[in-house]
Image (cartoon, coloured by chain):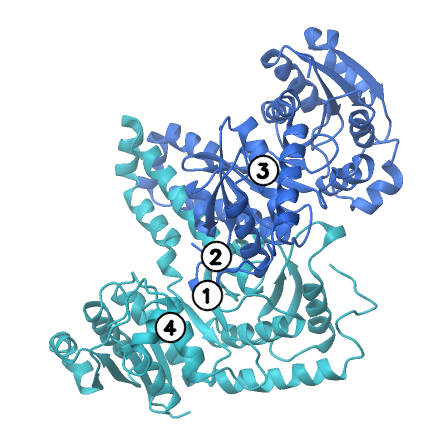
Chain colours: A blue, B cyan
Amino acid sequence: MAEKVRIAVDAMGGDFGPSVTIPGCALALERMPGSHFLLFGDETAIRAELANHPRLAERAEIRHSSVNIRMDDKPSQALRYGRRVSSMWMAIEAVKKGEADAAISAGNTGALMAMSKICLRTMARVDRPALACLWPTLRGQSIVLDVGASIGANASHLVDLAIMGSAMARIILGLERPTVGLLNVGTEEIKGVEEVKAAAAILRESDLPGLEYAGFVEGDGIGMGAVDVVVTEGFTGNITLKTAEGTAKQIAAYLKAAMSGSLFAKIGYLFARGAFAELKGKMDTRAVNGGVFLGLEGIVIKSHGGTDSVGFARAIEIGYEMAKNDLMNRIRDTIALAHQFESGAADPASPSQETAQ
Amino acid sequence: MAEKVRIAVDAMGGDFGPSVTIPGCALALERMPGSHFLLFGDETAIRAELANHPRLAERAEIRHSSVNIRMDDKPSQALRYGRRVSSMWMAIEAVKKGEADAAISAGNTGALMAMSKICLRTMARVDRPALACLWPTLRGQSIVLDVGASIGANASHLVDLAIMGSAMARIILGLERPTVGLLNVGTEEIKGVEEVKAAAAILRESDLPGLEYAGFVEGDGIGMGAVDVVVTEGFTGNITLKTAEGTAKQIAAYLKAAMSGSLFAKIGYLFARGAFAELKGKMDTRAVNGGVFLGLEGIVIKSHGGTDSVGFARAIEIGYEMAKNDLMNRIRDTIALAHQFESGAADPASPSQETAQ
């Protein structure tokens, strides 16, 4: 891949549109001088913002669209009025046409997923796309997938998730050989569903390059940073992610109530303001900022709808790094190896020496 | 049920054995003067503790066992050496024999579940037992089940969970008609697995007494207290519970680090100590204190292994209330109604007017 990385941006996506996405692009350009931008959306609105960012203006091209996808429309509705003509669709299509190396949108997640699937299609040998997120942990960050792109997964798809997640971890977390865990329940005797056990057997025995299979992980291991990549099926993954976000919000509410209680608590709060600001940053679910669609014929990054320009720049940075480091081919090669192993193995779905750890 | 409620206690269970369980029983007796105790475990150790609690001694009978179930043994191991002879098994068996109305143990969860299933068996018409927990929410408490007793659930079992959970909510949360939600993912177009959709149709159309079906709930709705009873299958439920516990621990670690940072933060901490103590109480996962096995021919309560006597007394109180308010028959009656509806319905598994909300 050339030094130049071309980013397609849905400038209208998110709660704030160009007033956040354009400053976000400007910030991303400062950090990654090799980037070029295709900006999709209302030309007048984009041009007004670009006036404040002359350096970005030099490296950006505007492609007008007057159709914005609304944040709370269902994917089917969004497709009905936004297919081919919306800023979101056009940004994705730029990747398909080879005009851009990655697409970024802070818009409606369901619509972005549906349009990406239809426009880009899944990679050869990958059954279903996945949505991966960066999860803050006590050790730093882990990648958790699938957090809601597809419901249900057989053993082979769980292995695909492990491969896609660890390819992302090598690039985004900078790890040579990330550890991978399969999310599972703790009780020994009923340990997990059959698909998870079968995926464990394949990961253990195939010894795939670029990842280290580390066994099962329980729910409380995610936040502890037990492994670099946590693999689970999309139903459980989506509920798990939202439960963690809900718990963080719940504790923030308790903390706020506690700190506004007694006079002593209020005085304490004043003294510890700096520490609370730091804590708030760590608890902010926007720090995770969206997710990455994996398993498609192209790179699509979902930025959080309510993000600010710093968060949007971070989402662009993720797309930039994944394109620059050739995520797609890394995934392709390892998936091919895994499927070779799976079809060669006697009966990977019911291994005889299953030794759950 | 008579005023007198007989409680069978595995006095040896938990991290601290009789030094916590016996003071816990004494505390429970103060609160619920109608209780009588059967104490299972090492007679010498129990008698030594009972010496400090003369009023409990008058209402308690000791049944000696020299076999304790270790906290980290697998259920199969525990059964091998503990069946029939351990304090845990004997406490459960007292319920089976009709000598006690409820059994309480702070011991090994997997072993307790396995022994309860084998000794008590599941209720007629109930396929699988469930483990229910009390989940602290911004509105108070909700009941979440199944958090790990059984893996996988079809629509009919999800309906059983709704019935069992709302019977528990009526007794423990004191609600006339608790609201019930099915845990699901948020994206409209891929909303949930087939079983969850089919269970939604049955709950919506059968209009069962004693519960109000309130639709789907997402992961972040649990801690907000969106509904009184959250129903999900045991794999997802177990991972969800542990993820929430892990997130609470993670935030507690951030908070501790933030408060021991700068001098100002330390001073702030000193002023706000009371508020922090209150917060710690709310974040303490032991407040949830274990769980309740539902769907068995008898009442078994799991207290948290690391609990203190106050927590153990709370677990006894839950068992006491469930026995006194005839949980078993309440569940039986509603399950019968639901199964009648399910077998009468044309095809509840694929309803034609599915209108997911």
> At 66% from the left edge and 44% from the top edge, which residue is drawn?
A339
Tell me the tag on residue A165. Answer: 3
Q: Quadrant of the C terminus of chain B?
A: bottom right
Kindly identify which residue carries mark 2.
Answer: B241
Amino acid at the residue labelled 1: Cys
User: In the shown orientation, is residue B73 left or right of residue A197?
Assistant: left
Q: Residues within 10 Å of mark 1 (few under 14, many from 20)?
A: many
Q: CA distance from mark 3 to mark 4?
A: 37 Å
**Quick check: A64 above or below A267?**
above
Among numbered discs 2 and 4, the one appearing first in the sequence:
4
Among numbered discs 4 and 1, the one appearing first in the sequence:
4
Chain under numbered label 1: B
User: In the shown orientation, is residue B21 left or right of residue B110?
Assistant: left
Q: CA distance from mark 1 to mark 2?
A: 9 Å
Kindly identify which residue carries mark 4.
Answer: B112
Tell me the tag on residue B133. Answer: 1
Among numbered discs 1 and 2, the one appearing first in the sequence:
1
Amino acid at the residue labelled 2: Leu
Q: Residues within 10 Å of mark 2 (few under 14, many from 20)?
A: many
- Give the label, 3 or 4, closer to the camera: 3
**Quick check: A121 above or below B18?**
above
Q: Are marks 2 and 4 on the same chain?
A: yes
From where the camera sits, is residue A9 visible? Answer: yes
